[in-house]
């Protein structure tokens, strides 16, 4: 992120973590070495016994083959107690050690330390939202270095799963319940670089778009980032709000809504301002048979077009545009009034945006973090 760049002095010196192997990405959390040890240990045991068994098998097959003119032995040994005891007891000891080490680390992974820094995570089809104790939110995950971080996670719709391979952590997000995951990353990430965070539960057509970055900042820098993050929308002058903040917020709408008229999961924003203002398309019907013109206007259900648009963002199920399902999650608590102003402003001035990408044509995007707050 560019703010990250601006406020980052210490982390500029940091390098992307090294230590990746053919099997595993670089271990970048405090529990990663333990997980890797279990994985590598079990692997090594498997290689050893595979080799031992294969070599002995081939050797015995050759050595004890039936030779020409030879009859089967009738006096071959049937049992060998010391040998049988050894091959039962040694593997038993090995799997007990595997269980002990694996279970110990599993318990450690499932018990967040009491002093953990809590970030709330919400997954929706198809994106992540991270909310910090100050109320600031972000699209990428930012965490303080050297401190345990607990993610308290929920899903707004279907099963998702949060997976950060470099940290060796992964947990499902189940609709209707909270799940937890914790990690501690001691090494700050270099600016402009982040650990991968994936959704690893197939959740529909946009599943592969649910990848984000995790940025680890030195604690002081993290605090500065939080303050900045909480204020970036407030700092934009009103008249610039729609084209500076709009495209950043639209990035979350883009999975379902186009600007160029293409039908998506939801209706395109093209021509939306005319439709809600009694212009072209205002006679189009909702699923329940009412029309835009029938519910928007003085004395009607929505006194102004803004009222209707605001409600559609906060309570998306209340009017369903004809031909579309009730697929949109509510953005209550995710977009504040100023963010909603920016979205409505963008709908009002669609000519100022690239119809394919949603990028502002009025001005290059500002050096502000990706955020909804
Ligand atoms: Cu969310 Cu896959």
Image: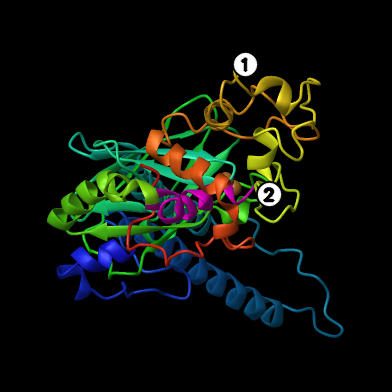
Over which residues does the magenta segment extend?
A: 240-256
Viewer-nearest residue: 258 or 350: 350
How crowded pointer 2 is (Cα within 10 Å; few <14, some 14-19, many 20+) is rated as some
Q: In this view, does 70 lie above or below 79?
A: below
How crowded pointer 1 is (Cα within 10 Å; few <14, some 14-19, many 20+) is rated as few
Viewer-nearest residue: 109 or 269: 269
**Left or right: where does residue 167 sit relative to residue 219?**
right
* Secondary element type, mark 2: loop
Q: Residue 301: give its label.
A: 1
Residue 17, horizontal then vertical, whole percent? 31, 72
**Left or right: where does residue 316 sit relative to residue 66?**
left
Q: In this view, does 310 lie above or below 66?
A: above
Identify the residue at image location x=60%, y=29%.
Answer: 316
Q: Residue 194: give its label.
A: none
Residue 68, horizontal then vertical, whole percent? 85, 85
Identify the residue at image location x=17%, y=59%.
Answer: 218
Sequence-wise, which precedes: disc 1 or disc 2? Answer: 2
* Secondary element type, mark 1: loop
Q: Cβ of disc 2 within 8 Å of ligand 1? A: no
Identify the residue at image location x=59%, y=78%.
Answer: 55
């Amino acid at each position: 992120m560019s703010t990250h760049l601006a406020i980052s002095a210490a982390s500029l010196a940091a390098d992307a973590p090294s230590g990746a192997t053919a099997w595993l990405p670089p271990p970048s959390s405090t529990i990663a070495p333990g997980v890797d040890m279990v994985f590598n240990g079990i692997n090594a045991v498997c290689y050893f016994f595979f080799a031992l068994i294969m070599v002995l098998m081939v050797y015995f097959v050759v050595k004890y083959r039936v030779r020409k003119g030879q009859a089967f032995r009738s006096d071959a040994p049937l049992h060998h107690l010391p040998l049988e005891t050894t091959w039962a007891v040694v593997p038993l000891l090995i799997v007990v050690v595997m269980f002990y080490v694996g279970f110990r680390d599993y318990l450690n992974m499932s018990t967040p330390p009491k002093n953990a820094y809590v970030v709330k995570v919400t997954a929706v089809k198809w994106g992540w939202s991270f909310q910090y104790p100050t109320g600031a939110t972000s699209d990428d995950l930012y965490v303080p270095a050297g401190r345990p971080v607990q993610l308290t996670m929920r899903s707004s719709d279907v099963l998702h799963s949060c997976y950060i391979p470099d940290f060796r952590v992964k947990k499902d997000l189940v609709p209707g319940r909270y799940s937890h995951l914790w990690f501690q990353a001691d090494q700050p990430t270099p600016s402009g670089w982040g650990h991968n965070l994936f959704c690893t539960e197939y959740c529909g057509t946009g599943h592969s778009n649910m990848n984000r970055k995790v940025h680890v900042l030195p604690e002081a820098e993290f605090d500065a980032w939080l303050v900045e993050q909480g204020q970036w929308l407030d700092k934009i002058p009103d008249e610039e709000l729609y084209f500076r903040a709009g495209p950043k917020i639209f990035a979350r709408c883009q999975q379902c809504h186009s600007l160029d008229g293409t039908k998506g999961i939801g209706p395109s924003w093209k021509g939306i301002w005319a439709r809600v203002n009694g212009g072209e398309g205002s006679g189009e019907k909702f699923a329940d048979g009412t029309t835009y013109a029938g519910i928007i206007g003085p004395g009607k259900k929505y006194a102004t077009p803004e009222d209707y648009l605001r409600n559609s963002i906060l309570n998306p199920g209340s009017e369903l545009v004809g031909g579309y399902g009730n697929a949109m999650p509510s953005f209550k608590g995710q977009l504040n009034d100023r963010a909603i102003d920016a979205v409505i402003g963008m709908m009002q001035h669609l000519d100022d945006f690239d119809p394919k990408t949603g990028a502002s044509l009025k001005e290059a995007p500002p050096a502000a973090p990706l955020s909804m707050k």
